[in-house]
Image: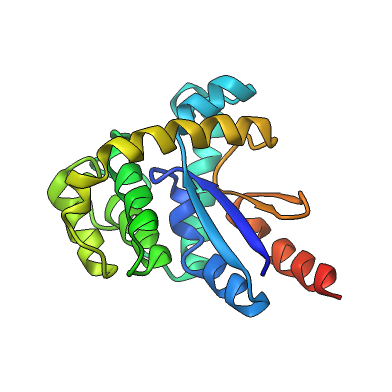
């Protein structure tokens, strides 16, 4: 079975705007998804990226315009300036890693619940109660926020190192088993096409 390695930040608006498309594409091609949340600021620093708040004003304004347009096309609610952004992405990332290790729920739904909480529901995804509610919504044990901290922290750091080694420089970012790279939710159609081509 094929696998798609999905590198992302739980804080990324474009991770949110991808909705469930990655999971739909994976199901279509019989592929699994390995969820690899990472420290996006660390990734920018390591790969020459510039954090949104440090970009030229014209880039910041274009980003807002693009987010609004993309959200409308996707039919998703969006606040381009959320009340709790930026916030600490580590707690939600650790929980997602712990959920992936534990199994039993829907990881795609969890990822979407976390990003939706930030970008559409004005919730702080660094808040333990918010993360627990997202875990429960996706069919996982809310207690994973307490039991998965250590392994989550180790994997979170390892995901960043792995991403740098594999040529990842932004989020969301998708890497296939044959080493094809796709950056951004607007490249999911290309990922779909690539998987069709490689399956013959």
Please tell me which residue is depicted at 63% across the width and 61% down the height of the picture.
Answer: 3
**Residue situated in front as seen by the camera: 46 or 82:** 46
Give the mark count.
0
Please tell me which residue is depicted at 49% across the width and 33% down the height of the picture.
Answer: 158
Quadrant of residue 115 within the rendered picture: bottom left
**Where is residue 69 drawn, in percent x and y?**
52, 58
Please tell me which residue is depicted at 12% across the width and 50% down the height of the picture.
Answer: 129
Quadrant of residue 88 within the rendered picture: top left
**Where is residue 160 drawn, in percent x and y?**
52, 32
Q: By what rule are the colours in the image chosen? A: rainbow
**Residue situated in front as seen by the camera: 62 or 186:** 186
Please tell me which residue is depicted at 30% across the width and 50% down the height of the picture.
Answer: 118
Q: Residue furthest bottom?
A: 28
Q: Residue furthest left?
A: 129
Q: Is residue 135 rendered to the left or right of residue 200? A: left
Q: Is residue 183 rendered to the left or right of residue 69? A: right
Say above or below: 44 vs 189: above
**Where is residue 99 drawn, in percent x and y?**
33, 56
**Residue situated in front as seen by the camera: 121 or 61:** 121
**Residue situated in front as seen by the camera: 157 or 86:** 157
**Where is residue 36 drawn, in percent x and y?**
49, 47
Position of the N terminus by quadrant: bottom right
Is residue 162 among the parts visible in the rendering? yes
Quadrant of residue 4 within the rendered picture: bottom right
């Amino acid at each position: 079975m094929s696998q798609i390695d999905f590198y992302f930040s739980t804080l990324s608006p474009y991770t949110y705007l991808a909705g469930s498309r990655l999971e739909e594409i994976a199901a279509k091609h019989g592929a699994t998804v390995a969820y690899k949340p990472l420290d996006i600021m660390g990734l920018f620093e390591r790969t020459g990226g510039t954090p949104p708040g440090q970009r030229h004003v014209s880039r910041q304004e274009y980003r807002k315009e693009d987010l609004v347009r993309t959200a409308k096309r996707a039919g998703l609610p969006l606040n381009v300036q959320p009340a709790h952004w930026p916030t600490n992405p580590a707690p939600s990332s650790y929980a997602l890693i712990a959920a992936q290790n534990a199994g039993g729920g829907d990881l795609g739904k969890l990822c979407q619940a976390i990003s939706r909480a930030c970008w559409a529901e004005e919730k702080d995804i660094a808040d333990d109660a918010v993360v627990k509610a997202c875990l429960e919504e996706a069919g996982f044990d809310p207690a994973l926020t307490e039991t998965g901290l250590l392994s989550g922290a180790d994997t979170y750091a390892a995901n960043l190192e792995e991403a740098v080694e594999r040529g990842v420089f932004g989020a969301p970012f998708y890497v296939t088993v044959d080493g094809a790279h796709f950056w951004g939710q607007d490249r999911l159609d290309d990922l779909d096409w690539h998987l069709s081509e490689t399956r013959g």
